[in-house]
Image (tube, rainbow, N blue to C red):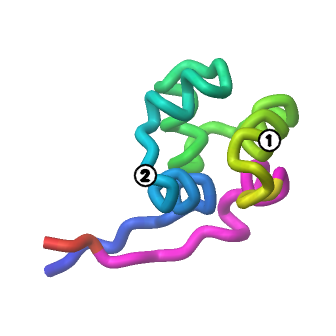
Amino acid sequence: MKMQIPQTPLRVVRLANGLTLSQVAVAVQLDVGNLSRIERGIQAASVDVAERLTTYFEGKITEMQILYPKRFTTITREKK
């Protein structure tokens, strides 16, 4: 049975750009653990962090998508 994985917009754009959590965290001056929790929708991003991420990804993701990820999350099936 394949597992369904929620894909937040932040995770989608990061993976589409071939970047690791560590690379993005360093670039936006954020702890990798915090970024991971934000990406998974467990921790809310501050407006400042959302602005930095939007700037870093050159508008490929909006502040709204970062601040309210559950509104934009899609479900994908895990590949085995």
- Find disc 2 in the rendering and name its residue: 18
The residue depicted at 78 percent of the width and 49 percent of the height is: 67
Q: Quadrant of residue 29?
A: top right
Spatial distance from mark 2 to mark 1, Cα to Cα?
A: 17 Å
Image vertical order of residue 54 relative to residue 71, above or below: above
Instruction: Look at the picture and state if 36 lies above or below 34.
Output: below
Image height of 74 relative to 52, above or below:
below
Q: Residue at x 46, y 76 (%)?
A: 75
Quadrant containing the C terminus is: bottom left
Numbered mark located on residue 20 in the image = none
Q: Name the residue located 48 percent from the left edge and 26 percent from the top edge.
A: 33
Q: Is residue 62 left or right of residue 56?
A: right
Give whichever of discs 2 and 1 has the lower sequence position: 2
Magenta-drawn segment: 63-77
Task: Name the amino acid, label 1.
Answer: Thr
Q: Is residue 13 left or right of residue 45?
A: left
- Disc 1: which residue: 55
Q: Residue at x 60, y 40 (%)?
A: 38
Task: Count every numbered label the image shows and give the total.
Answer: 2
Magenta-colored stretch includes residue 72: yes
Q: Is residue 7 left or right of residue 57?
A: left
Task: Identify residue type, mark 2.
Answer: Gly
Whether pointer 2 and pointer 1 mark residues with C-beta atoms closer than 8 Å, the reply is no
Of residues 5 and 49, the one drawn nearer to the viewer in this rendering: 49
> How many residues crowd mark 2 within 10 Å: few (<14), some (14–19), many (20+)?
few
- What SS does tag 2 mark? loop
Q: Quadrant of the N terminus?
A: bottom left
Which type of secondary structure does the marked residue at label 1 adopt? Answer: helix
